[in-house]
Image (cartoon, helix red, strand yellow):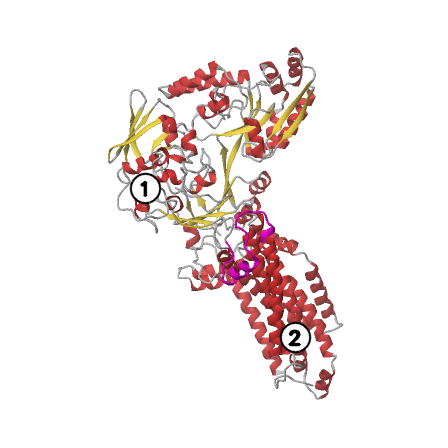
Amino acid sequence: MIKLIFRQIFFVLVSFTGVTLISYMVLNSADHGANTSLSYWQYISNIFKGDFGTSLVTAEPTINSFLLHLPASLELVLLSSILALLVGLPLGVIAAKYHRTPIDTIINNISITAYSMPIFWWAILLIVYIAIEFQLTPVAGRLNFIYDIEPVTGFMLIDTFISDQSYRMEAFFDAINHLILPVITLATLPAAIICRMTRQTMLTTLNADYIKTAQAKGLNGFGIYWIHGLRNALIPLTNMLGLQVSTLMTGAILTEYIFSWPGIGKWLLDALSQTDYQALSTGILITTSMVILINAVIELLGFWLNPQTKSSKRIYHG
Amino acid sequence: MLLQHRFATSYAIFIALLCLFLAGCDNDNSNLLSQSGLVYCSDGAPDNFNPQTGTSYTNFDASARVIFNRLVSTNNSTGIIEPALASHWEMSSDGRSYLFHLRKDVNFQNTQWFQPKRLFNAEDVVFSFNRQKDEQNNFHKQASGEFNYYQNMGLEKNLRAILARTAHQVEFQLVEPDSSFLHTLSMDFASILSAEYAAKIEAQQQPLKNLDKFPVGTGPYKLKKYQQNAVIRYQAHENYYASRVHLKNLVYAITPAPSLRYARLITGECDVLTNPPKSQYELLSKNPDVNIYQKPGLNIGYMAFNTDKKPFDDANVRKALSMAINKARIIDTVYGKLGTNTDTPVPPSMTPFHNPNIKLPKYNPEQSKLLLSEAGHNQLSLELWVLPVQRSYNPNGMLMAELIQEDLRKVGVTTTIVSYEWNTYLDKVRAGEHEMALLGWVADTYDAGDFLRSLLGCTAIKAKTNRSHWCNLEFDALLNQASLADNIEEKIALYHKAQELAVLHLPILPIATGQSVMVANKQVQNLELQTLGGVSFTDVSKVAKDD
């Protein structure tokens, strides 16, 4: 295990070096004439000191505006991931359980449709019908403009809840209302992927010998599917989910753009349209590093879950 | 089996709770907060909150019309100058000096960044104008002397001095008499700032730009918070001198995309928007939940003939070309309900200065052909320049140009359409490179001279706003008499005469005046369109949703 952790750290460091090299080159090749060119080592040591440079447009440290926009993105991505898991995982298990029945076919068709739907088109469809036609949700933004909520954590659900304004609960529900469409938009693709992967790995797992042994021992349906089946199916699943983090990030940029969601994605796109290379390179550097780190952590998690790499009494082992 | 039940049950409860949560969000209407606050979907972010340095409507809408007042104001329906911060005034017999008597009961706003210790007085007036006039003033230097309106309105040369006679009397001394002087003082750039606040900024050695970033005025709303490029929050000024302010909160939601403004209005996130594009205007006019307010703006879309170039130096050719153009069709196709015809260079909305008795030569292609051949032009090949942007005075320049091209083809004139990027276009037109050009003008004051002098005056050729380069001494004499006229009847008569002359010579073909349009949901009460453009929420209130 220790060896594995070191291997991951080494892998992260190599990737990080690569990313910083690229962002350094982007920064220096861009003809903006703002800062006299730093050497790569200065650049790196500045980054470790927390100095990512100042924006060419607002003249503020780019790291500040990054951190200002980060919570909005995290709120969106976290809630979408939770929704994707809540929907995708059970559907995948159900499809596997009812393999080759109409239920399986229906779930399969839904997940293929959701998987192949372009996010832009799906979002606009949701806006046109749910927001404009039936007026169930707002079209864009994080909170109705009328509410003046002081950002404390940057997470709107928390900030509205802990606010001392008399309308805090009203604002809290309004924040939820604003989350519905962006979260559905962003969760759709990962939910479909999770559903399909869960179904696939479940089917493989259920055919394994130890499941058959368990069945022979007389274990009932629930134990088979949810404990033996899903627990073991989760192992390959976590590894594959790690790869989905970058998909989620890309989706988040598009979602933020469509719903005027003031997160990192919108911030990056604004920086791009204003040719603010300093902000752009900061944004790319940090988001890419974040994806690398998350992948590493998930990979470790996969090792930890895998009974072949860790002896644990909690795991039923055929 | 028990375990399976427990899992399934908890999952079901979780989903049920989630649904309950989401359902809870529906009862957001008819609460007190949304009744006491109004959200305006504005189309751009202001550069600061100072109307002295600003030149754009975005700036004035966010500063002059909410935070500040002026000495005098223009009545929105009659256009007559009325008292504001000055209760009354006297003009000296030679017209070179104005003495303003100030109100003694005007409070400046109490804000997070400044708590006024005294009421409004003459010092504030002197400071507000000296900032723009006095090159030694620190706040003048801080703004790098960029006071465009102050300079454009001629005050730089004509304002000799501003003197506080007593604590509540201010004298303005002019170099030359100016009959539009009161109109000038009603303009946004003439807003009154707090001298006490400026002194405090200097004394505390705060950055001088704080004066424009954290404004303090006497107006109906005070600034609370500005989130760059996103939201401007105002609160009611509880001691506003002129009236009780009904809305506790006023919010400008900065929304540059027209489609998002539209969607936000429909879904109730915004209460008001302005100047929707034609397609959205048509949808909104069918929507039972909104009120549309509109009236002709103080602007004019026109076509200039460059009289420096042949054959446009010939008044008969200009007349013939004007007669060939089917204006009724242009107004129908290009403007629809967003514009009205105008036959003179002063739009009909500017009553009583607009001369309603003047008619342009009637649309008559046959007569036009005849006139052209009489002038010796059987084969003409001309250039028509087109503005590349959408403006209220011309919502679709290219379409208009194509219609004109087709009309002129019918009388044997070949037209080439020319267009450049907007700033290049303006530069080239200012340089006089054009032949015929589609252009527009928006008034800043309620004075016909604004249109006539800027578009057709001889001096305006040098100032580069007269794009026909037409100079007529009789016409200029009429304008000069009008600016010196003692009474309004005389002034009206002179302006009417000047319009006759302009239509007789036709250096420009007046086309239409664009509508100012404001759309608001039905909860919004007492919204009034501003004749001189921009928005004002001073007297606005909101009622509960009736559903």
Instruction: Identify the chain of the residue marked 1, using the numbered disc in the image.
Output: B
Residue nearer the viewer, B474 or B430: B430
Instruction: Identify the chain of the residue marked 2, using the numbered disc in the image.
Output: A
Q: Is residue B543 above or below residue A284?
A: above
Three-letter amino acid code at the position of disc 2: Leu
Q: Residue A75's spot in the image, x, y percent?
A: 53, 62
Residue nearer the viewer, B134 or A310: B134
Question: How far, Cα to Cα, is label 1 from label 2?
Answer: 68 Å
> Which disc, if any, is residue A234?
2
Q: Residue B45's spot in the image, x, y percent?
A: 48, 45
Three-letter amino acid code at the position of disc 1: Ser
Query: In terms of image quadrants, where is residue B372?
Result: top right
Seen as rendered, the residue at the extreme top is: B374
Instruction: Residue at 39%, 19% (x, y): give it.
Output: B489
SS type, badge 1: loop
> Which disc, if any, is residue B194?
1
Which range is magenta?
A27-53
Query: In terms of image quadrants, where is residue B386?
Result: top right
> Which disc, if any, is residue A181?
none
Q: In this view, does A180 lie above or below B494?
A: below
